[in-house]
Amino acid sequence: MNIRFSQRELLDLAVAWTALSVAFALFFGGGGNAVLARPALLVGLLPASLVTAGLGFLLHELAHKVVAIRFGQLAEFRADYGMLFLAVAGALAGFLFAAPGAVHHRGRITLRENGLISLAGPATNVALGALFLPVELFVGGTLGDVASLGVRINFLLAGFNMIPFGPLDGNTVKKWSLPVFAASGLVCFGLAAWALFGFSFV
């Protein structure tokens, strides 16, 4: 399997990763007013955001690309610069909605293959959240706090993307197989709810 990235795609991935990480850092910091009052807060939060929200987004999209290529597709990520701007502007205002872009693929494909391409993204977020979990449980301190953020964000990303609506992954999975959607949705929605309503392991 030969995975290649065009210069345009690498630029889009870098811009989306950075913009989304800034948006999450602003949101974590309480919005624009809070960050302007304490600029060092953004500097401290940005690295954590890059390796939790940013990494979660990046690996989610790369999972779509890898599986699409595995099925013989031509696949490439394209950033949505308008939505990235809105994500940062919204975070400055104290709320967050992020739709940074998507992997576009083309070629002959079955409904099952398309469903598996879509499922790869949320599954990657679940796996990444699970990888952060032992660090939260056994390390503690600043690294443990960052890991806790990684668990929450990735479980929330998995749940959000499995919503069966519009262009979201869950809608494509549901069109392919209702039993697969029900099983994977149960996991993703359950973990997202667990993250959203304040679970704590330590």
Image (spheres, helix red, strand yellow):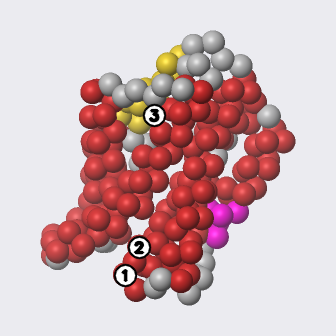
Seen in the image, is 119 located left or right of residue 77?
right
Which image quadrant: the C terminus? bottom right
Seen in the image, is 5 located left or right of residue 3?
left
Residue most toward the front?
1
Q: Which residue is mark 2?
A: 146
Q: Which mark is residue 142?
A: 1
Q: Which residue is mark 3?
A: 102
Q: Which of marks 2 and 3 precedes in the sequence?
A: 3
Residue 192 falls within the magenta-colored stretch: yes
Element carrying mark 2: helix
Across and down, in percent, residue 78 comes to 38, 30
What is the three-letter code of the residue carrying label 2? Val
Q: Main secondary structure of the magenta part?
A: helix
Element carrying mark 3: strand
Element carrying mark 1: helix
In the depicted view, which residue is nearer to us: 33 or 145?
145
- Label 1 Cα crowd, 10 Å radius (few <14 / some 14-19 / many 20+): few
Q: Are marks 1 and 2 in contact (CB under 8 Å)?
A: yes
- Residue range (magenta): 190-194
Is 105 drawn above or below residue 149 in the view shown?
above
Q: Residue at x 28, y 50 (%)?
A: 18
Is 172 drawn above or below residue 85 in the view shown?
above
